[in-house]
């Protein structure tokens, strides 16, 4: 299967993750598995798990990452995030690109609680969004709103990234579960 050039959004998200050697990473909504490939090809080992609720997308991600699957660097499962069971495995980083339940008020609490349970101590959650277009100032308002929502849900925002690219800026917010010892 010939791999198309990765979109700037995915390249920027992977760069923002900047995983350390040996880290375990979970992508929620892995689609065709492009980010999984980019992460698996980085030096330093580690393991990347991708989940997608669509059987078609999970199959596409497996097809794209066959070599990485065989080498044990990538795992792909067809699963909803709410139902995903990694047994005892915990992740250093969890990320999602354009997965609205992470910022929708009616779904975010359950998604954030699930992410908290799947992270190792000190782990980070990265939420990225790039809609087809942002009205003037909307990207900054989205980042601020997402940061406030995360803080209100017991997360500490560690950084915010805004990357200008076509068709619109990509916004990423990284957060860790807040320390209970305050």
Image: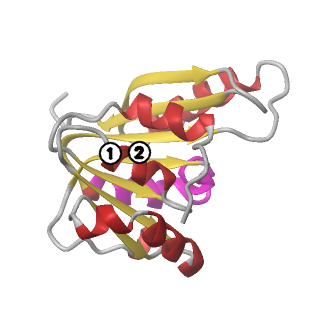
Tag count: 2
Is residue 7 found left or right of 76 in the rendered image? right
Which residue occupies the foreground of this view, 163 or 145?
A: 163
Percent across and percent down for residue 154 are: 36, 39
Splitting the image into 4 quarters, where does residue 38 fall?
A: top left
Q: Which residues are magenta?
A: 99-117
Q: Quadrant of the C terminus?
A: top left
Q: Which residue is pictured at 43% across the width and 43% down the height?
A: 153
Task: Describe residue 24's horizontal placement relative to residue 99 as left or right.
Answer: left
141 left or right of 124 in image? right
Q: Residue at x 49, y 36 (%)?
A: 13
Is residue 156 inside the magenta stretch? Answer: no
Position of the N terminus by quadrant: bottom right
Front in this rendered view, residue 87 or 5: 5
Q: Residue at x 36, y 73 (%)?
A: 84
**On the image, numbered disc 2 is attached to which residue?**
38
User: Would you say residue 100 sits in the magenta stretch?
Assistant: yes
Disc sitting over residue 155 in the figure: none
Report how far apart the C-alphas of labels 1 and 2 lie in the structure. 5 Å
Res. 101 image quadrant: bottom right
User: Residue 177 in the image: x percent, y percent?
Assistant: 29, 40
Q: How is colour applied across the structure in the image?
A: secondary structure
Q: Secondary structure at mark 2?
A: helix
Looking at the picture, how far across and down is residue 32, in whole percent?
A: 55, 62
Q: Which mark is residue 41?
A: 1
Name the residue at the front extreme: 2
Q: Residue at x 59, y 22 (%)?
A: 162
| 1 and 2 marks in contact (CB < 8 Å) | yes
As helix, strand or loop, the secondary structure at mark 1 comes to loop
Nearer the observer, 84 or 25:
25
């Amino acid at each position: 299967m010939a791999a198309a050039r990765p979109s700037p959004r995915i390249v920027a998200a992977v760069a923002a993750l900047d995983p350390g050697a040996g880290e375990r990473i979970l992508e929620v909504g892995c689609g065709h598995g492009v980010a999984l490939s980019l992460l698996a090809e980085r030096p330093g080992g580690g393991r990347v798990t991708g989940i997608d609720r669509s059987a078609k997308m999970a199959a596409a991600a497996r097809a794209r990452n066959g070599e990485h699957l065989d080498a044990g660097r990538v795992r792909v499962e067809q699963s909803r995030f709410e139902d995903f069971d990694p047994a005892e495995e915990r992740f250093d980083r969890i990320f999602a690109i354009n997965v609205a339940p992470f910022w929708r008020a009616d779904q975010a609490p359950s998604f954030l609680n699930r992410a908290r349970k799947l992270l190792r101590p000190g782990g980070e959650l990265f939420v990225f969004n790039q809609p087809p277009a942002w009205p003037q100032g909307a990207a900054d308002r989205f980042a601020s709103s997402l940061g406030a929502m995360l803080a209100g849900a017991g997360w500490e925002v560690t950084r915010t990234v805004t990357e200008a690219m076509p068709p619109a800026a990509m916004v990423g917010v990284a957060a860790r579960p807040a320390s209970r010892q305050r």
